[in-house]
Image (cartoon, rainbow, N blue to C red):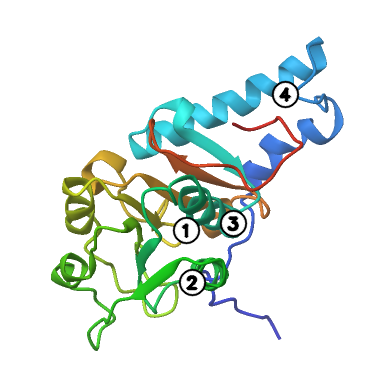
Amino acid sequence: MKRIYLDYAATTPTAPEVVEAMLPYFTDRFGNPSSIHSFGQEGKAAIEEAREKIANLIGAKQEEIIFTSGGTESNNSALKGVAYANQHKGNHIITTPLEHHAIIEPCNFLEKSGFKVTYLPVDKDGLLNPEEVKKAITTKTILISVIHANNEIGTIEPIAEIGRIARERDIYFHTDAVQTFGHLPINVDELNVSLLSISAHKLCGPKGVGALYVRKGTRMVSFMHGGEQER
């Protein structure tokens, strides 16, 4: 009996053209992109070309794209990176209970580290009212994180409106767009986001590859040390 796969919201098969494009970098063009010799520079050129393409897709600058191992790393980098870099300004984070575990768990971790997290209520459809965001903001709020579209029920949140609220109050705003990248139009300026997470495996790309958009000027620190491949 032929099996039918109906869970593309969880992951997708890697498209044949993607596999074909990647294969040379497993065999002939295998150089370390951090190396200065021709093999390395060939790999670096491919990475920078990919970085530029991702940036163009979301209306960002090439230098604002950081490659990661996937959505979980992107989300952890965004939340922990901004929280620890800005704790001199405040310790309050706003999010929702409908976030992916890759947001909820880092928030739990940050709470144990002394940060305060507010989980805003949503309606019966999982929709967040931007007015709830306004009411939750305090003088200590440094970060708001709201998922672009829920990974289980599909609710699309009013990200642009929430982003305007955050921008007017000089608060960093992150959205987890892993579920929407490649499926909905995304422009980081129109969405008013400071940070945005994406992952390749949701749209027929390879597993273990993601990216984090970080708007220029965003104050954050890295929670990983030792490698110099990314910014």
Q: Quadrant of residue 214?
A: top left
Residue on which disc 2 sits? 100
Residue ID for mark 3:
201
Work out whether mark 1 precedes mark 3 in sequence or the reverse, and give the earlier one.
1
Contact (CB < 8 A) between labels 1 and 4? Answer: no
Look at discs 2 and 4 and give the one toward the viewer.
2
Residue 146 in the image: state x and y as whole percent.
Answer: 34, 64
Give the residue at mark 1: 178
Q: Amino acid at mark 3?
A: His
Q: Secondary structure at mark 1?
A: loop
**Separation of residues labelled 2 and 4 (CA atoms):** 33 Å
Left or right relative to 174: residue 42: right
Mark 4 lies on residue? 43
Q: In whole angstroms, how far apart are the C-alphas of marks 2 and 1? A: 10 Å
Q: What amino acid type is highlighted by mark number 2?
A: His
Q: What is the x, y in percent for residue 116?
A: 41, 70
Whether tag 1 and tag 3 are in contact, CB under 8 A, the answer is no
In the foreground, 4 or 13: 13
Q: Quadrant of residue 140?
A: bottom left
Query: Observer-nearest residue: 189 or 194?
Result: 194
Residue at mark 1 to residue at mark 4: CA–CA distance: 26 Å
Q: Nearer the viewer, residue 21 or 181?
A: 181
